[in-house]
Image (tube, rainbow, N blue to C red):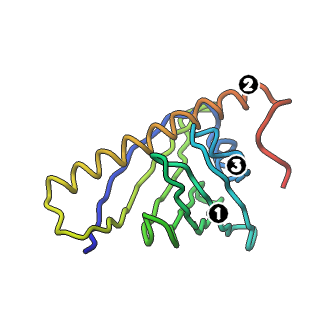
Amino acid sequence: MQASVRYGFSQRLNAPAREAYRWCTDYQPDDLSLMHERGERKIQWVTDDTVILREVVDQDGKRIRKVKLVKLDPANLSWYNIHLSGPSKHSAFTYRMTPEGKNRSKLTFTGLLVVYSKTQLNDRKLKQIARDERRYDSNAWKHLARALSADINNPKDRKTSSR
């Protein structure tokens, strides 16, 4: 059985929106470590605005394989990520940057999660899944926000490449 779960959050960033967008969408093999995750990432650029991420992530002692399709929309400082395989297969995640003054921005995240289960999930269980997923993803973005801030303040050590 499948069910859909929607959740979201926002994360303030100490960087101008356009620079934050560029940093967040400059995919690198070591990005998982910035989120305090262990794993490997392979990156395949299909076009300037389309990338496939192949990941193997260590979660709870298990190696989880994921394939994600990411579509970028630089004009709107947004992007989305669709899981093609893995435990969140067919789920979609959207990201939007908005300016908050000259040197700050805000990321708005929405998760549209497909949950696979052998049994029918009641509303209480679906709400718990949404809370857990929100906590997990927002913690990852707190780590990314700190890494972004560190890169902005130390340009010589910057993550962003000149693609």
Mark 3 is on which residue type?
Answer: Arg
Question: Which mark identifies residue 53?
Answer: 1
Judge from the rendering whether residue 115 lies leftward or rightward of residue 127; answer left or right. right
Q: Residue at x 56, y 57 (%)?
A: 78
Q: Residues within 10 Å of mark 3 (few under 14, many from 20)?
A: some
Q: Residue furthest front?
A: 61
Gap between marks 2 and 1 measured at Cα = 28 Å
Q: Nearer the viewer, mark 3 or mark 1?
A: 1
Confirm or deny contact between disc 3 and disc 2 (CB under 8 A).
no
Residue type (three-letter) at the residue carrying disc 1: Leu
Residue 68 is situated, as x and y percent measured from the top left of the image, at: 57, 66
Q: Quadrant of the N terminus?
A: bottom left
- At horizontal 32% and vertical 65% (from top left) the residue drawn is 115
Quadrant (top left/top right/bottom left/bottom right) for the C terminus: bottom right
Q: Position of residue 108 (x, y in %)?
A: 46, 47
Question: For this rendering, which residue is in front, 6 or 73?
Answer: 6
Q: Please tell me the numbered disc located at residue 22.
A: 3
First reached walking from the N terminus: tag 2 or tag 1: 1
The answer to whether residue 36 is left or right of residue 118 is right
Q: Amino acid at mark 2?
A: Asn
The correct choice, above or below, for 8 with respect to 34 in the image is below
Which of the 4 image quarters holds residue 126? Answer: bottom left
Report whether 112 appears left or right of 144: left
Horizontal and vertical percent for residue 148?
A: 65, 34
> How far is mark 3 from mark 2, CA to CA?
16 Å
Q: Nearer the viewer, mark 2 or mark 1?
A: 1
Which residue is rendered at x = 32% and y = 68% of the image? 116
Q: Secondary structure at mark 2?
A: helix
Few, some or many C-alpha atoms within 10 Å of disc 2 (few <14, some 14-19, many ≥20)? few
Q: Which mark is residue 153?
A: 2
Q: Please identify the quarter of the rendering in which residue 75 is found.
A: bottom right
